[in-house]
């Protein structure tokens, strides 16, 4: 959806093919998988897959961008700043929150290659922040067919913070 905003025609199949993925699997009774900062955990086309954070999506999107655009990791930035810098000029922003802005569900765990444990929030969702008004943000969830949904700003901010303030923008490259 964000690539289409910038006039870049891509299909979901092309995007999934370009996404770096690693499987989740059981080894000796222990669930193992990648660090979601490095790879998509599973395959977005298969049930039981989890997801990823900004770096894998940034690498995937960058493969489709012309030289005048770049994908930039803006994780950690407050939504109020993104509102002023991007939304105010009509540019959408990718953020991570929870599906339907529900409470986070911390029920998935797996061992990562470095031996650490990933505590994945099962209802994590990458969404597109498309607009705002005084009390609300407009959020488009690509997994929903409802179109942009108006959510209370405080709730969106809370979910964004609970997931870790993960954010990705596309902007014009500096010449």
Image (cartoon, rainbow, N blue to C red):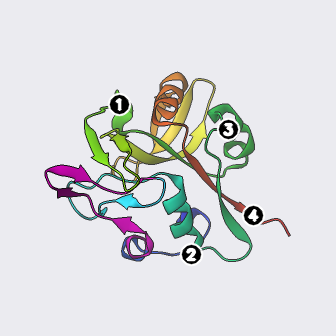
Q: Is residue 27 magenta?
A: yes
For discs 1 and 4, the disc positioned in front in the rendered view? 1
Q: Residue under circle 1?
A: 104
Circle 1: element type: loop
Circle 4: element type: strand
Horizontally, is 122 left or right of 11 in the view? left
Horizontally, is 120 left or right of 136 in the view? left
Q: Residue 83: give its label.
A: 3
Task: Report x, y in % for residue 16.
Answer: 38, 70
Whole-number angstrom distance, CA of label 3 to CA of label 4: 17 Å
Q: Residue 64: give its label.
A: 2
Which residue is outermost to the right?
175
For discs 3 and 1, the disc positioned in front in the rendered view? 1
Read off the magenta span: 15-36
Query: In the picture, which quadrant includes the C terminus?
Result: bottom right
Q: Residue under circle 4?
A: 172
Circle 2: element type: loop
10 Å crowding of disc 2: few (<14), some (14-19), many (20+): some
Q: Can residue 1 be seen in the rendering of this structure?
A: no
């Amino acid at each position: 959806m964000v690539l289409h905003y910038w006039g870049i025609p891509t299909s979901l199949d092309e995007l999934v093919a370009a996404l770096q993925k690693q499987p989740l699997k059981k080894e000796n009774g222990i669930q193992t998988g990648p660090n979601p900062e490095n790879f998509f955990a599973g395959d977005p086309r298969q049930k039981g897959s989890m997801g990823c954070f900004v770096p894998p999506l940034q690498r995937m999107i960058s493969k489709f961008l012309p030289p005048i655009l770049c994908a930039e990791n803006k994780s950690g930035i407050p939504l109020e700043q993104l509102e002023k810098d991007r939304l105010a000029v009509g540019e959408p922003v990718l953020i991570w929150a929870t599906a339907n802005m529900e409470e986070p569900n911390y029920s998935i765990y797996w061992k990562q290659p470095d031996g650490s444990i990933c505590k994945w929030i099962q209802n994590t969702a990458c969404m597109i922040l498309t607009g705002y008004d005084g009390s609300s943000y407009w959020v488009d969830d690509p997994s929903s067919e409802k179109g942009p949904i108006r959510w209370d700003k405080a709730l969106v901010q809370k979910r964004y913070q609970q997931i870790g303030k993960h954010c990705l923008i596309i902007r014009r490259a500096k010449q």
